[in-house]
Image (tube, rainbow, N blue to C red):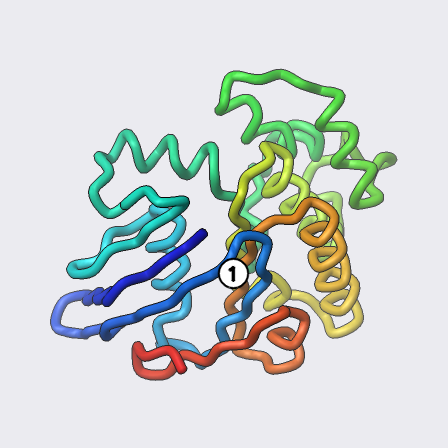
Amino acid sequence: MIELENIEKSYGNTKVLKGINLEINKGEFISVMGSSGSGKSTLLNLVGGMDRPERGRIIIDGENITSYTDEELTLYRRKKVGFIFQFFNLLPNITVFENIMMPLLLNGSEDKKTGLEYIKRVGLEEKQNAYPYQLSGGEQQRVAISRALIHNPEIILADEPTGSLDSETEKKIMELIKQLVEETEKTVILVTHEHYIAEYAGRMLRIKDGIIF
């Protein structure tokens, strides 16, 4: 489903990715483990269409997204990709329910029934009218997970999704992510610097100095 062919990416004079080749099957949950600066977040940004490589091709379902226009990349992100970030990236001035609904609204849908379904999936029915600042870190990440899944994307990209949580909450969030992606048969790429987080995936890879092994 996802193919990376000889991907290279630099920022200024620093080459961050050095000829990455990778194939990921539909429904596969992989983790990419590496230290800060190893290139793992850059890799996610490229697969998610938030950045472009200097060289190589990224093939998603047979489509070469590296040849997409900016408008086509925006549509690709809205339709096919769900993002889970370390610091949640919730909009502070709208409610839990409105945050979860945002991807649907961007795609022209106001399907509140689906919104309520995803709130229930992460156990936050009683918090749907709360604001992000009224939630714990773990609860905020549950909102972010619902938001990532609600528009039924094929690909979930998780960038250090437990990096700002305590160890007990980390475990609960990772178990929730694993359960939900198995139920919905999503293709998942998770990047982390922690080995015990990487082990939740079905396949573990390492990245160091811009090279995957």
Q: Which residue sits at x=55%, y=39%?
A: 153
Q: Where's residue 196, x and y in %?
A: 66, 80
**Number of dots carrying numbers:** 1
Question: Circle 1 sits on which residue?
Answer: 189
Q: Which residue sits at x=74%, y=48%?
A: 183
Residue count near mark 1 (Cα–Cα under 10 Å), binned few <14, some 14–19, many ≥20: many
Quarter location, residue 61: top left
**What element does badge 1 sit on?**
strand
Quarter location, residue 201: bottom right
Horizontally, residue 131 falls left or right of residue 188, namely: right
Q: Which residue sits at x=59%, y=38%?
A: 92
Task: In the rendered view, tell whether residue 108 sits above or below residue 13.
Answer: above
| Front-lying residue, 60 or 123 | 60
Q: Where's residue 76, x and y in %?
A: 39, 36
Where, quadrant-wise, is the C terminus in this rendering? bottom left
| Front-lying residue, 105 or 137 | 105
Task: In the rendered view, tell whether residue 106 sits above or below residue 124.
Answer: above
Q: Where's residue 49, x and y in %?
A: 34, 46
Q: Residue furthest right?
A: 126
Task: In the rendered view, tell whether residue 7 sits above or below residue 102.
Answer: below
Q: Amino acid at mark 1?
A: Ile
Q: Which residue sits at x=55%, y=59%?
A: 86
Quarter location, residue 6: bottom left
Horizontally, residue 78 falls left or right of residue 59, namely: right
Q: Where's residue 181, x and y in %?
A: 67, 52
